[in-house]
C-alpha cells in the first residue's frame, strides 16, 4: 500500500540501480523526509563504501514507469551538522587499481574495501581494521574546518586549536546519521584557512532517480561516469551504457529549497534518492569539494506521465534565474507591449526552464544540455543557443562537466508537454 509520507534514515553502500531495494511506494503527490549523510570526503575516507558517496535508500513513487518523469519539489533543506571539513584533494600512495573512489585498497595489507575506524585525529586518523595502518587514499593540498552558528546561516573557519577540539568528537560535530557507515572528515583536522566568515545556502549535491543499471552513486553523471568507461574494476562499463545514468549527482547549487527538480524515470518506481548536502558552494565547485554536511531534506513528488526526459530539468527559485531569463516588471512589460505594437510584432508568450547537461568536460556538458533542450522542445540546437544567449544564461554547476542551460521557452510547447502548470505554480503566473 502506498504511503502519504515516507521517512528515510537508511543508506545504500554507494551503489545505485535496479538491484536496490526500494522503500515505499510513496503516493503520487506525497512526501519523502530523509536524514542524509555527508557526501564526498566522508565516503572517500571510508573504503568499505564502494560507490564513493553515501546516499539514501531509494523510494519508489506510485505509478512511475520508465519513460515518465518525477517532479521533485524541494520543500526544505536543513543542515544538522555543527560544522564540517573540506578542501582541495591530492592522492596519497597506491591504494587503488584505477579509481581510488570506487576501487579502494589498503596500501599496507592490500585488503579491498576494508572496514576502518578512526584513531585520534590528523592526516593518518583513518585506520584499517585488518592491519591498523593508515588506509586513506586522499589528503588535503589545502584544507579547512568550518563551524556554523546555531541557525546554520553563517560560519567561520577554525584555527588549529579549535579544529582539534572539534576533531576530538567528529561524529557529534558533524551529526553523522545513526545508520551511516562513513568516517567523518573532521577527523583529518585540516586548518589551513582560519578566520574566514562564510554564508550558508544549503542545497542537494545528489538528488534524483536511480539509473537504469547498477553504478556508483558518485559516478551517476556524464563527467564522473566517463571514468567508468573501459575501467578494469567491477564497475567498468561501455560508453553506450552512460545512457542509463540519470545525472543525480549534479552539484548544482540551484537545487535548493523552493526549487523543483524534474528527473527522468529509468526503472519502475523511479527510486528517489538524496545525499551529498552542501552547506554552500560557488558556481563551478572549483576546488572539486565544498562543505558536505548531514541534514534533513523534505521532498514532495509528482509523476509526469510520458515526458521521456533525457536528463534532469530544474525550475529554480525565481531569484536564481539568470538575469535575462527573469520575468519583466510591469513597467518593462508595458514598454515592450508598446514597442511590439509600433513594429507590428506579435509577442511570444514564454516562460523560463533550465536543462541540466553533463559530460566528460564542460564543452561536452554544454552541448548535452543544449541537445536535451532541443530534443524535448522540438527546436534546433542553434535556436536553443540563441534563446540561451538573449533570454537566459549558461551556468556551471561543477567542473569538469555539469551545467545548466536556462532560457525562455514558448508556453504553447510547455503546455503540450504538460509542464506549464508546474511552471505557472512555481512562478505564480
Image (spheres, rainbow, N blue to C red):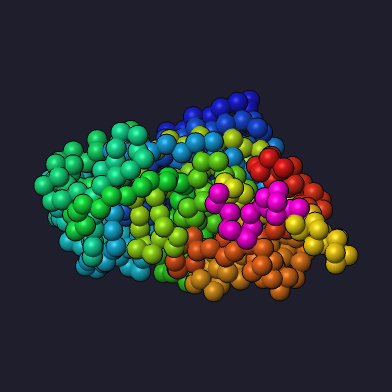
Q: Could you tell me what secondary structure mostly forms the magenta stretch?
A: helix
Of 285 and 400, the residue lying toward us: 285
- Residue 33 vertical position relative to residue 186 in the rendered view, above or below: above
Q: Which corner quadrant holds the N terminus? A: top right
What residue appears at the point 17 percent right and 44 percent down from the top-left corner?
167
What residue appears at the point 26 percent right and 66 percent down from the top-left corner?
90
- 329 drawn magenta: yes
Provide the residue span drawn in magenta.
Answer: 319-334
What residue appears at the point 85 percent right and 64 percent down from the top-left corner?
342
Relative horizontal placement of residue 344, taking residue 147 as reference (left or right):
right
What residue appears at the point 36 percent right and 40 percent down from the top-left corner?
153
Q: Which corner quadrant holds the C terminus? A: top right
- 3 drawn magenta: no
Of 190 and 226, the residue lying toward us: 190
- Residue 83 vertical position relative to residue 289 in the rendered view, above or below: above
Q: Position of residue 28 (x, y in %)?
A: 66, 33
Q: Position of residue 112 (x, y in %)?
A: 29, 57
Amino acid at each position: 500500500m502506498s504511503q502519504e509520507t515516507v521517512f528515510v534514515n537508511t543508506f545504500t553502500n554507494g551503489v545505485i540501480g535496479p538491484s536496490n531495494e526500494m522503500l515505499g511506494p510513496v503516493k503520487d503527490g506525497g512526501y519523502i523526509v530523509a536524514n542524509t549523510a555527508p557526501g564526498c570526503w566522508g565516503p572517500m575516507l571510508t573504503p568499505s563504501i564502494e560507490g564513493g558517496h553515501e546516499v539514501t535508500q531509494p523510494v519508489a513513487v506510485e505509478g512511475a514507469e520508465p519513460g515518465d518523469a518525477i517532479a521533485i519539489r524541494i520543500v526544505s533543506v536543513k543542515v544538522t551538522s555543527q560544522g564540517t571539513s573540506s578542501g582541495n584533494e591530492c592522492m596519497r600512495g597506491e591504494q587503488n587499481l584505477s579509481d581510488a573512489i570506487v576501487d579502494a585498497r589498503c596500501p599496507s595489507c592490500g585488503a579491498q574495501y576494508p572496514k576502518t575506524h578512526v584513531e585520534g585525529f590528523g592526516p593518518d586518523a583513518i585506520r584499517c581494521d585488518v592491519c591498523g595502518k593508515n588506509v586513506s587514499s586522499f589528503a588535503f593540498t589545502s584544507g579547512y574546518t568550518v563551524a556554523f552558528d546555531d541557525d546554520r546561516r553563517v560560519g567561520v573557519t577554525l584555527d588549529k586549536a579549535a579544529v582539534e577540539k572539534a576533531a576530538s568528537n567528529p561524529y557529534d560535530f558533524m551529526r553523522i546519521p545513526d545508520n551511516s557507515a562513513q568516517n567523518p572528515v573532521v577527523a583529518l583536522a585540516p586548518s589551513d584557512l582560519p578566520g574566514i566568515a562564510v554564508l550558508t545556502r544549503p542545497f542537494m549535491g545528489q538528488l534524483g532517480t536511480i539509473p537504469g543499471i547498477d553504478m556508483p552513486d558518485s559516478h551517476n553523471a556524464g563527467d564522473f561516469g566517463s571514468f567508468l568507461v573501459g575501467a578494469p574494476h567491477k564497475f567498468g562499463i561501455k560508453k553506450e551504457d552512460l545512457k542509463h545514468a540519470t545525472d543525480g549527482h549534479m552539484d548544482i547549487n540551484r537545487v535548493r529549497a523552493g526549487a523543483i527538480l524534474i528527473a527522468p524515470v529509468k526503472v519502475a518506481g523511479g527510486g528517489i534518492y538524496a545525499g551529498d548536502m552542501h552547506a554552500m558552494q560557488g558556481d563551478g565547485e572549483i576546488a572539486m569539494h565544498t562543505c558536505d554536511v548531514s541534514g534533513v531534506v523534505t521532498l514532495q513528488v509528482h509523476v509526469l506521465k510520458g515526458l521521456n526526459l533525457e536528463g534532469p530539468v530544474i525550475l529554480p527559485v525565481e531569484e536564481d534565474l539568470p538575469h535575462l531569463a527573469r520575468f519583466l516588471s510591469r513597467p518593462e512589460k508595458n514598454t515592450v507591449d508598446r514597442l511590439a505594437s509600433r513594429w507590428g510584432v506579435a509577442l511570444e508568450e514564454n516562460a523560463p526552464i533550465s536543462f541540466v547537461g553533463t559530460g566528460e568536460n564542460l564543452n561536452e556538458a554544454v552541448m548535452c544540455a543544449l541537445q536535451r533542450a532541443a530534443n524535448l522542445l522540438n527546436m534546433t540546437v542553434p535556436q536553443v543557443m540563441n534563446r540561451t544567449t538573449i533570454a537566459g544564461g549558461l551556468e556551471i554547476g561543477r567542473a569538469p562537466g555539469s551545467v545548466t542551460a536556462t532560457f525562455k521557452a514558448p508556453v504553447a510547447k510547455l503546455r503540450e508537454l504538460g509542464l506549464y502548470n508546474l511552471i505557472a505554480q512555481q512562478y505564480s503566473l
